[in-house]
Image: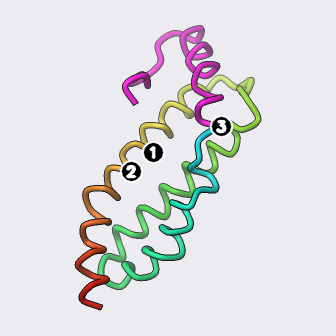
Amino acid sequence: MRWLPKSVGSRADAQVTAVRISPLAASSPWISSLHAVVEQEGLSPEMTDEFPDHINVLRFERREIEKVLGVAIHGVRDDRIWPDRLVAVLHLLRGHILKEQDGVFPAARVVLVAG
């Protein structure tokens, strides 16, 4: 996500950022992907007993990400905070993916094999 700005500066910059990013966010396979099904129905229930706090954080993040990307499907909102909210949730998505990649998936190998 190198194309993703750390933050948006002026209001005009924010609107341009939202116009550029909204179609990308809306086309994200995140919302109804196999990944989501595997995470929600496969890994989360199996991992909750061992890592309840971590799994609850990931569930919360998923709800926040889905909420904002669900709005992005409908295009750019005429809302002063929308560009910042969209950029923030895309940063959250990046961090969420890294938590899964570096934490949940390696731990799942141990938990699921041992179980």
Is 82 placed above or below 96 here? above
Residue 19: image location, x then y, percent: 64, 19
Amino acid type, label 2 = Ile
Splitting the image into 4 quarters, where does residue 56 fall? bottom left
Q: What residue range appears in magenta?
A: 1-26
Any magenta on residue 9?
Answer: yes
First reached walking from the N terminus: tag 3 or tag 1? 3
Q: Is 70 on the left-hand or right-hand side of 52?
A: right
Q: Which mark is residue 97?
A: 2
Give the label on residue 93, or none: 1
Percent of width and height locating residue 21: 57, 25
Q: Is residue 75 above or below residue 64?
A: above
Q: Residue at x 35, y 85 (%)?
A: 49
Residue drawn at point x = 59 percent, y = 47 percent: 29
Q: Circle 3 sits in a helix, a strand or a loop, which is it?
A: helix
Element under disc 2:
helix
Front label number (3 vs 1): 3
Furthest-bottom residue in view? 115
Q: At x 56% / y 61%, what residue is drawn? A: 34
Q: Quadrant of residue 12?
A: top right
Q: Which numbered circle lies on residue 26?
A: 3
